[in-house]
Amino acid sequence: MQKNIEELESLSAEDKKRLAITGLEVDSLNRCGSFFQIDQEIVYSSCEYEGIEILTLEGALAKYAWMEQYYWKLVEKDRDEYTRYVADQSHPKGYVVIAKKGSKNILPLQTCLFLAHESIQHVHNIIIAEEGAELHLISGCASSASTEHGAHYGVTEFYVGRNARISTTMIHTWGREIEVYPRSAARVEENGTFLSNYVAMSPVKNVQMYPVAELVGEGAVARFNSVVVALPGSCLDLGSRAILSAKDTSAELISRAITRGGTVIARAHILGEVEDTKGHIECKGLILEDGIIHAIPEIEGWVTGTELSHEAAVGKIAREEIEYLMSRGLDEDEATATIIRGFLDVKIEGLPDMLQKQIDAAIDAAESGF
Amino acid sequence: MLRIEDLHVEIGGKEVLHDINLHIGEGETHVLMGPNGSGKTTLIRTIMGFGDYHVTRGAILYRGRDITNLPIHERARYGIGLMFQRPPTIAGLKLGKMLVATSGNRPEEVAEYAAAMNMAEFLDRDINAGFSGGEIKRSEVLQLMIQQPDFVMLDEPESGVDLENISLIGSAIAKLLEKDRHIVSRHKSGLIITHTGYILDYIETDGGHMLCDGEIRCHGNAREMLQLIKAKGYRECIECKKI
Ligand SMILES: Nc1ncnc2c1ncn2[C@@H]1O[C@H](COP(=O)(O)OP(=O)(O)OP(=O)(O)O)[C@@H](O)[C@H]1O
Ligand SMILES: [Mg+2]
């Protein structure tokens, strides 16, 4: 395993700042472990905590024969050109995290995928929380301020065991000409919980993703939250899907999108396959400057005992709300910013405070742009 | 403090207020009465400066300054404050955050005033979202306590409020209006809209005005005027020619 923190230290001050916005701490104080990959090179990987193992994907495949049971099992190799590209690599990159049975870690494990030069970065990650384990991940994905063109193809497979919990918080700081195609999927067993949070506040050319959570065990829960701002030239095609295939499973898919001239497609799909399942979708969009917000919430029920609902709204800030704050002494811009900040404020149930604060900070950092 | 001259106001092309004249001196609190739809809310929202209310004639003077065309926030910064009859809900914006945003350099007062208004548990809730009628009123008064306006306009402060909370709200408003001070050292003025007059049990007032069909029909002692309405309804006011 390579440990080469100097490589990180050699990043420019501006790049370090871009990483900090994504929630990454180079000194790793409040983290239970770290994984850094710059372009195709894994520069740092460590975990001090008992019960959590972090490996490179190649290392994990060599070390554990059973790894094959988790490799390309939730995402299909043949799904599209991006998954095929990742599957065709003779030296697959990315990481494997295994939270051992019963291990609980409130401190997040941080993973960073940094695009420093013009290239396609590919990764394949596998995250396993064994029975009763609790694992929090914060993945910052960013590109160097000097990287103009580039693409990131990322396959991630999450396995949430019985009574286990995985939260994954992704904060993206890509560049204007970067294209990003994450392909992820989760399988959640009995009473397991999968939380997925996505924040993207800075310009990017294209992001396209539609992660899916299959709730296969009774009582499993999935919650997806995304908070995004589309600037001119950005197209964010973001969705999330939950398949409720066991009794007492539930899912909540929440998105907040703002356009300042870019395009957001907010997709969501919940499928209630069996009795006693519940799902709710909430897509809210604010058009601050002419752009596109296209909300496509879908709810699909197959049996009588599934309860699915959705709520979608796209529009501008109501004049009445701005005037309410102005009557308390805020000028129009202050009132607007205060309302936008509230709009983006999503409190995520079950997320450790530290991660919630990280999300809030990422949004605050971008807020000055409004 | 506030002088309104020959004021005509249109909403959506329709004239709602006609030829309003009103004067409220420093330290005085006046009462605005009148049947539903007569234009009371329109008058105070016009004074605050909301966009839908177009002044087609006349002027609003505050402390001698013509504020007729000033934006809302400048009026607020000059010291005009409004307790809304029906404030909007702002999804996502927490009451506490709004109070801090409007508290200027005194954010530490938020917790103290919230406790005084029994609103401590509401600071983490979206403004007005699911608030009951009485809770909305308490939240409005709390916002005014943070704002500390010099000219306080209250749109039906007691409607939908239970007896215990009327006393809480009434005393808080009396304090906002410096009713604990002697008239000569009192600088705050107010305009209160009320149908029932219950709020007047907590606040001494100086004059009443009856608005009917967008016109002020008479001036007088607020309690007397309310008693007359209770006894005879608005019929006489509607028939009464303008004085
Ligand atoms: N935005 C608006 N668009 C159209 N008409 C309006 C608007 N706002 C007020 N009006 C009309 O103006 C008139 C006066 O309304 P206003 O709200 O001022 O009455 P009010 O005296 O406060 O009544 P209440 O005692 O019921 O609160 C009413 O006929 C009302 O329907
Ligand atoms: Mg009214």
Image (tube, coloured by chain):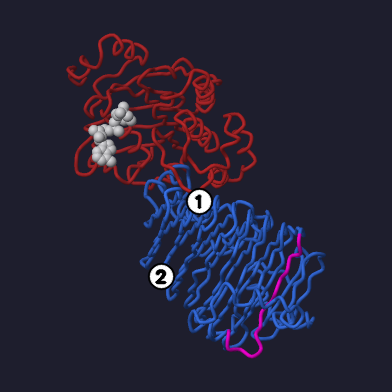
Chain colours: A blue, B red
The residue nearer to you, when weighing B89 against A308, is A308
Vertical order, A315 against A151 (above or below): above
Q: Quadrant of residue A99?
A: bottom right
Q: Position of residue A287 (x, y in %)?
A: 39, 61
Left-right relation of A318 to B228: right
Picture coordinates of residue A86 (x, y %)?
A: 58, 84
Residue A280: image x %, image y %?
47, 52
The magenta segment is A87-101
Callout 1 touching callout 2 (CB < 8 Å): no
Secondary structure of the magenta portion, mostly? loop
Residue type at the position of mark 1: Thr
A309 relative to A15 in the view: left or right: left
For numbered disc 2, what is the local secondary structure? strand
State which image quarter holds ligand 2.
top left
Circle number at residue A263: 2
Q: Can residue A11 be seen by looking at this rendering?
A: yes
Position of residue A153 in the picture relative to residue B136 (left or right) = right
Mark 1 Cβ inside 8 Å of ligand 1 = no
Amino acid carrying mark 2 in the image: Thr
Q: CA distance from mark 1 to mark 2?
A: 33 Å
Subunit ID for the residue under disc 1: A
Kindly tell me whether residue B17 is visible in this rendering.
Answer: no
Q: Which one is closest to the eye, mark 1 or mark 2?
A: 1
Q: Is residue A69 above or below residue A131?
A: below
Image label count: 2
Residue A11: quarter of image: bottom right
Q: Which mark is residue A277?
A: 1
Q: Are marks 1 and 2 on the same chain?
A: yes
